[in-house]
């Protein structure tokens, strides 16, 4: 009997204790299913089977996935196997004769992108994960989930590959922008709200990445070595909270290894904890190309290998594994049943209607929700001399590389083509009547800008012509011809089926310089590639050896300059194929062909002193708004940042220093998804952390700069003074493909507090345009017993003159414990909107989960313990600004599993 037959098995050695909780969750799952819009009559409640529970009438069903299991049992073994991998890049396999439709998945956490990585169907772009997290607003996250449900449907999809709940272990994490926080409680609560909103629309969440994917460097090969206690208290915790509070229908395994085993094969977490201890009944999907074997991965419970067609789960591979006894038929049938359950929960078994074509769904509700989320995520780190909000200025200078760029999202799977974008310049101009001047100051992009704006196709459109040939050598006539607006031509998901699996392609375009000078091209290709200008070989990248970061699996960017004249067009020709490069990789991955593509950048010679221009602009204005930061090129998938400093090569820091010296009323707006070094922080009177804020980025920023709304964001992650201060510093990004999580449970503020290292800005910090006074807190119980919840109430008064939100945070401190514990841990928070002079009570709820630590020596696989003794509840405006406290006690220790 496998795990699917025993969802409420009691794996705990502590007999009886945890049954109660698991039962309650079972009921919750069933009730949630009753309201799912996709259910067909086969699953209506059995009226004979009504039982009383906790004083209420609740329906109990047969197990909700019975229908999926019955159907799975009817299929042939080959049919079952066929369900265990994708049909194509985004879809599951259909078996029409059995009434099994295909369902479609789509990225990602801040919008539903649809089928294509670049130039896809326009979609709503929400603020990135860390920006959402800075709102600390669970209701808002639930609404975002609902709207993303509608967006997912508009892309014809059923499963959204989100949310991302990995921890911010180091400030350099490439995908920190996309995940929420360094704190597992905040992360788990935000994720659960998002998932509840999404799934209320019948769209499946795919909580990710399970587990230990806190870095991008060598993400498919590194081994995250995580001690059991840290695994439980930090890295599994957000998943645990989300399973308890929102029961996600799907989960994505991560690329990396955990404690020596690839995450998709790790039975300890997938089988024993997730499906065993937590009784979770969803479907596990591997990260894209994150399945590494046949039997171990199916056996551990990774149900779907993505993308398809399968590499590891062909019929003969799975049958051979069964033959050898590495896999049982039951393993296969159970995994197939879980795939069918996901299909049933989303599209519905038996629903053979054709997939809806992708559509846009741009509407005023979604725009205002994005604006509100962006405003609430803006985090005011510093505001001396009330530089903000800006009042009475007649002339403003907007300075910096990001003023007129739309820095709206991070890169990788979080990227998409937004309905529209707003820049800081647009936002301020539409809200300011005075004179507005601009200076770029410096350049901050990681790669050369795309050549696209200078390029025309043979038809006179902006862009390039792409000609595909079957085979490696451009033989005969091109089979498919496409025009593309951009010169980021990554063909991973868009190379036409007709030319697969081995193809070559030419890119043709006419480039017209807008100035005379020594201009620079950049070129990177996934396979072999070369560039001709006016018929002459210009860049030869045919046999490249060093991998770069401009696209997944692509070469380093090759830069080369050439003298060109204004208005005099040149013909560009690129030839490339999808052969694997570097050639040495062929033996490692076992394939000669892979995904193809290339990127063409272009920049004209710069003849002005941009920093001097900026200084002149700042001097001439009443106040200067400096917009600096990172962008989707610096923060993305597949790599981590190399330094915490603002790019490039100190140019932004020098610009900031120069502008600060030129105008004392300078507001620094920083757009980035993770902390950056701020050597000038002492001299800047105002610093606003603006993250990546989606489509309404510019408007949200302007609303806050001018005080139309007060900022209310609080940092979900510590900003250290120096990179060297961070807890992962000595173990990042590992050596010899091994990353030891040596800081254990002391991640983020847990580390800075214990080590007494003052951060630049602490976790939970964020100012606004008013001030708040905290009254004396009350607590409704002095003693916490196992089934209790304790409510702490604190009155908060707005003592200033602007309406604003306050986010009240409750940290629990274990006064005396057998094991060492952090100084304090966030266990509750509440957000209130207060008018000037208004007082409201904020209620904070605590329970056994607020005090537990994990004892690895209890029973077979450890258990949570509430240890007898006193606990303080530290209530404050940030982790470092504690305003008051109350205490309670646990009289007698108790334990639990889930
Ligand atoms: C069948 O699937 C389509 C597309 O996912 C959906 O729009 C429709 O509501 C479904 N029908 C039923 C009866 O669930
Ligand atoms: C970095 O900046 C310094 C000046 O601070 C300059 O001397 C150096 O050439 C720059 N390096 C690069 C690679 O641009
Ligand atoms: C800007 O943001 C980045 C990323 O969030 C952060 O690393 C850096 O410290 C910030 N700088 C300032 C001046 O706020
Ligand atoms: C690197 O790790 C592998 C596998 O764990 C091990 O066999 C090898 O000895 C290590 N090499 C070094 C230089 O530490
Ligand atoms: C953990 O459990 C073991 C076994 O019951 C016990 O001996 C030990 O004292 C416990 N440790 C802590 C820190 O609770």
Image (cartoon, rainbow, N blue to C red):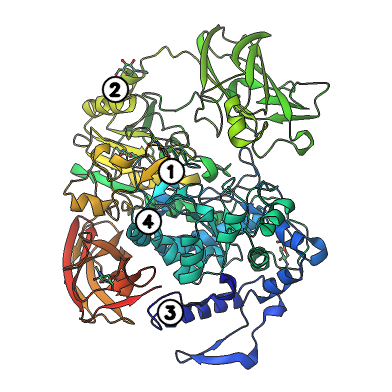
Quadrant in which ligand 2 is drawn = top left
Label whose residue precedes the other's in the sequence (2 or 1): 2
Residue 888 rendering spot, x and y as whole percentages: 19, 76
In the displayed structure, 360 sits above or below 143; it is above
Distance between the alpha carbons at the discs numbered 3 and 2:
63 Å
Is residue 844 visible in this depiction of the protein?
no
Q: Quadrant location of residue 498?
A: top right
Q: Residue at x 38, y 82 (%)?
A: 17
In the displayed structure, 620 sits above or below 851; it is above
Q: Is mark 4 within 8 Å of ligand 3?
A: no
Is residue 156 visible in this depiction of the protein?
yes
Distance between the alpha carbons at the discs numbered 1 and 4:
13 Å
Label whose residue precedes the other's in the sequence (1 or 3): 3
Q: Quadrant location of residue 320?
A: bottom right
Distance between the alpha carbons at the discs numbered 1 and 3:
39 Å
**Depth check, front residue: 443 or 610:** 443
In terms of secondary structure, where does tag 4 sit? loop
Left or right of residue 681: residue 282: right
Q: Quadrant location of residue 48?
A: bottom right
Mark 1 — residue? 692
In terms of secondary structure, where does tag 3 sit? helix
Quarter of the figure with the C terminus: bottom left
In terms of secondary structure, where does tag 2 sit? helix
Label 4: few (<14), some or many (≥20) within 10 Å?
many
Mark 3 — residue? 21
Left or right of residue 265: residue 342: right
Mark 4 — residue? 135
In terms of secondary structure, where does tag 1 sit? loop
**Depth check, front residue: 261 or 569:** 261
Mark 2 — residue? 615
Left or right of residue 57: residue 712: left
């Amino acid at each position: 009997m496998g795990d699917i037959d025993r969802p409420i098995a009691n794996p705990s050695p502590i007999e009886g204790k945890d049954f109660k909780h698991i039962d309650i969750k079972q009921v919750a799952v069933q009730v949630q299913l009753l309201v799912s819009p996709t259910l067909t009559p086969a699953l209506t409640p059995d009226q004979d089977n009504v039982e009383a529970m906790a004083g209420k009438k609740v329906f109990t069903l047969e197990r909700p996935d019975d229908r999926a299991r019955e159907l799975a049992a009817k299929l042939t073994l080959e049919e079952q196997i066929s369900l265990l991998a994708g049909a194509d890049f985004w879809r599951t396999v259909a078996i029409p004769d059995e009434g099994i439709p295909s369902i479609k998945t789509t990225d990602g956490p801040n919008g539903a992108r649809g089928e294509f990585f670049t130039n896809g169907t326009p979609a709503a772009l929400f603020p990135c994960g860390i920006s959402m997290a800075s709102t600390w607003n669970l209701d808002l996250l639930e609404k975002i989930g609902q709207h993303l449900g509608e967006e997912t449907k508009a892309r014809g999809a059923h499963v959204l590959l989100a949310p991302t709940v990995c921890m911010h272990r180091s400030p350099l994490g490439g995908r920190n922008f996309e995940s929420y926080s360094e704190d597992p409680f905040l992360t788990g609560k935000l994720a659960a709200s998002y998932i509840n909103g999404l799934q209320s629309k019948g769209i499946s969440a795919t909580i990710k990445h399970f587990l230990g994917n806190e870095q991008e460097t060598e993400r498919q090969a590194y081994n995250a070595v995580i001690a059991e206690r840290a695994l439980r208290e930090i890295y599994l915790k957000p998943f645990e909270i989300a399973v308890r509070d929102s029961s996600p229908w799907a989960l994505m395994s991560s690329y990396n290894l955990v404690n020596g085993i690839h995450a998709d094969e790790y039975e300890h977490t997938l089988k024993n904890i997730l499906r065993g201890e937590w009784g979770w009944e969803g479907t596990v999907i591997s990260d894209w190309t994150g399945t590494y074997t046949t039997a171990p991965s199916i056996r551990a419970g990774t149900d779907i290998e993505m993308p398809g067609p399968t590499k590891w789960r062909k019929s003969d591979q799975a049958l051979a594994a069964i033959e050898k006894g590495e896999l049982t038929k039951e393993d296969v049938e159970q995994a197939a049943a879980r795939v069918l359950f996901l299909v049933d929960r989303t599209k519905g078994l038996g629903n053979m209607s054709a997939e809806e074509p992708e559509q846009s769904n741009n509407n005023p509700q979604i725009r205002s929700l994005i604006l509100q989320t962006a405003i609430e995520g803006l985090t005011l780190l510093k505001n001396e001399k009330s530089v903000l909000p800006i009042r009475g200025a007649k002339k403003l200078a907007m300075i910096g590389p990001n003023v007129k760029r739309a820095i709206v999202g991070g890169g990788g799977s979080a990227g998409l083509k937004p309905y529209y974008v707003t820049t800081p310049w647009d936002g301020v101009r539409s809200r300011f009547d005075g004179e507005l001047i601009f200076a770029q100051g410096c350049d901050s992009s990681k790669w050369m800008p795309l050549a696209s704006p200078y390029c025309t196709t043979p038809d006179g459109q902006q862009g390039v012509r792409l000609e595909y040939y079957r085979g490696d050598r451009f033989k005969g006539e091109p089979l498919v011809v496409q025009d593309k607006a951009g010169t980021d031509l990554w063909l991973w998901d868009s190379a036409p089926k007709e030319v697969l699996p081995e193809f070559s392609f030419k890119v043709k375009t006419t480039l017209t310089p807008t100035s005379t000078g020594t201009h620079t091209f950049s070129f990177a290709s996934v396979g072999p590639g070369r560039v001709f200008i006016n018929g002459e070989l210009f860049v030869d990248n045919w046999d490249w050896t060093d991998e770069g970061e401009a696209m997944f699996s692509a070469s380093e960017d090759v830069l080369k300059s050439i003298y060109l004249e204004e208005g005099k067009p040149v013909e560009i020709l690129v030839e490339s194929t999808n052969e694997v490069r570097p050639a040495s990789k062929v033996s490692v991955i076992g394939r000669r062909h892979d995904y193809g593509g290339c990127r063409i950048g272009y920049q004209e010679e710069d003849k002005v002193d941009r920093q001097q221009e900026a200084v002149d602009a700042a001097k001439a204005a009443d106040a200067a708004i400096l917009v600096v930061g990172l962008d989707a090129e610096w923060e993305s998938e597949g790599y981590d940042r190399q330094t915490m400093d603002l790019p490039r090569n100190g140019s932004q820091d020098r610009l900031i220093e120069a502008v600060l010296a030129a105008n004392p009323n300078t507001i620094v707006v920083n757009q980035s998804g993770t902390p950056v070094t701020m050597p000038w922080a002492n001299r800047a009177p105002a610093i606003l952390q603006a993250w990546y804020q989606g489509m309404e980025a510019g408007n949200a920023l302007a609303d806050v700069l001018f005080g139309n709304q007060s900022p209310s964001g609080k940092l979900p992650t510590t900003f250290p003074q120096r990179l060297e201060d961070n807890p992962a510093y000595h173990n990042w990004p590992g050596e010899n493909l091994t990353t030891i999580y040596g800081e254990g449970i002391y991640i983020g503020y847990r580390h800075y507090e214990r080590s007494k290292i003052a951060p630049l800005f602490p976790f939970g910090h964020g100012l606004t345009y008013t001030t708040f006074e905290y009254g004396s807190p009350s607590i409704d119980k002095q003693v916490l017993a196992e089934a209790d919840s304790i409510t702490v109430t604190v009155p908060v008064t707005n003592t200033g003159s602007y309406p604003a939100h306050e986010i009240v945070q409750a940290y629990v401190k274990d006064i005396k414990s057998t094991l060492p514990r952090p100084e304090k841990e966030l266990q509750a928070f509440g957000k209130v909107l207060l008018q000037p002079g208004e007082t409201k009570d904020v209620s904070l709820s605590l329970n056994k989960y607020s005090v537990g630590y994990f004892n690895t020596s209890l029973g077979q696989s450890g258990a949570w313990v509430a240890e007898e003794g006193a606990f303080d509840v530290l209530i404050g405006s940030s982790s470092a600004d504690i305003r008051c406290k109350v205490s309670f006690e646990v009289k007698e220790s108790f334990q639990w599993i889930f």
